[in-house]
Image (tube, helix red, strand yellow):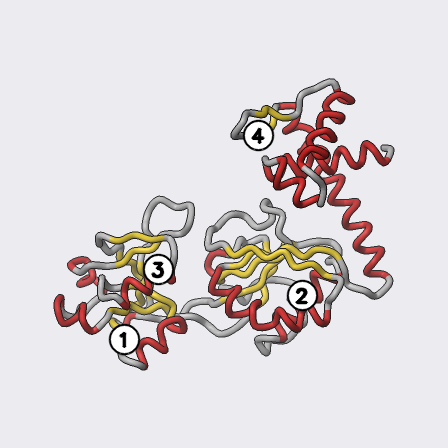
Amino acid sequence: MNSADFARIRAFLAVAETLSFSRAAEELGITSSAISQTVKALEARLGQQLFQRTTRTVSLTDAGILLRERMRPALDEIDRALTQSRDAAGRPSGIVRIVSFRSAGEKFILPILRELRRDLPEVTLDITLDDGLDDPVAGGFDLALRIGEVIARDMIALPLGEELRQIAVAAPDYLSRHGTPDHPRALLSHDCICWRWPGQQHPFPWEFFDNGRWFSITPSGGLIVNDKPMALQMALDGLGIAFCIEDTVRGHIQNGQLVSLLEQWSAPFPGFYICYPRQRQMPAATRAVIERIRAGTGQESRLLRDRSSVR
C-alpha cells in the first residue's frame, strides 16, 4: 500500500464511521471537498461505489460495508503498533476514548481533568457522556464508566467508589396534596416521574429490597423522561415522586426541598466501575488514565484480572 492508498483508506473509514463527509473532514483536519475527492479517487481505484449519497444522507453500499469490515481491524492494528512504539519511549501518548454515564463523568472525570492534562500532555481524551447501554467495545471506546449491574461479563471492571442506593423522593408540596406512600406498592396510586434508559421504549422499573430479595415496581404517571436531572427538577417542582441516586439528592433533602420516602425498602447495590475489554497488551496511555481516575477516588491502582467483585 502506497501513501496515497493509505490516505484514501483513512478518509473512507472516517466517512464510513460518521456517515458524514463534513464531520469526517473535521475529524481529519481537512476540507469537505478534499475528503470527497479522496473518496472518489478510492472508488475509481477499486471500480466500485462505496457510498450512496443524497442531499441529506450518506450510507454505505454493500461494497463499502465489506471494505469497512476488512480495513478497520487492519488500521486499528497499525495504530496500536504506533502507540506501542511511542510507549516504549516512556511517553504515554495517543487517543483514549471514554464513554461514561453522565453522573459518573461529572463525579470521577471532571474533577481530575486539570491533573490529567498536566500529567499526560501527549494523551488526547475523547469523552462521550451517554446514559445509554450500547456496547462500548462495538462503539470503539477504550474505557467505560458504568454501574456494576449493567457491565458485560466479558469486561474487566475496577471499582471507583462505594455502593450506591436509589431512593424515592418528593417535594413537601406534593406530599401535602397527595399523601405519603407507606409501602413501595402504594406508588402505583401516585404521580411518579418515570425514567427510561436512552434508546429504550419502556420506563425503568423501581427496585426495592425486602426479606432478603429484590422486587420491582413499575409506577405509573404522566411524565416519562430519559434525563435524570430533568426528573429531579420535576420532583423539586412538586410534579411527582422521583427515584434518584441518594448522593444526587442528599443536599435537597437536607435543605428541606425534598423528602426521602420508603428508605427501609431501599438497599445498596454495586456502584460505579471503570471497565475495559480484555486485551493482550494495554496501551500505556489507557493504563495511565485508569490509574489517575482511580487514584482520584482513593482506590488502589492495581489492575484487576477479573471482575468477580462486581457481583
Q: Which mark is residue 289?
A: 2
Whole-angstrom CA distance, mark 1 to mark 3, is 16 Å
Question: How crowded is the residue under tag 4: few (<14 C-alpha within 10 Å), some, or many (20+)?
Answer: some
Nearer-N-terminus badge (1/3) = 3
- In the image, residue 123 sits, relative to residue 163, either above or below, namely above
Q: Which amino acid, mark 4? A: Val
Real-space Cα separation, disc 3 to disc 2, in angstroms: 31 Å
Identify the image quadrant of the N terminus: top right
Image coordinates for residue 223, horizontal then vertical, percent: 26, 53
Residue 118 quadrant: bottom right
Between the residue at mark 2 and the residue at mark 4, the CA separation in whole angstroms equals 35 Å
From the viewer's perspective, is 23 left or right of 240? right
Q: Which mark is residue 257?
A: 1
Residue in view at x 81 percent, y 50 percent: 81
Quarter occupied by residue 253: bottom left
Circle 4 is placed at which residue position? Answer: 58
Residue 280 in picture, x, y percent from top left = 74, 54
**Residue 115 coordinates in the image, percent (x, y):** 66, 73
Tell me the CA gap for discs 4 and 3: 34 Å
Task: Check disc 3 and give the amino acid type.
Answer: Met
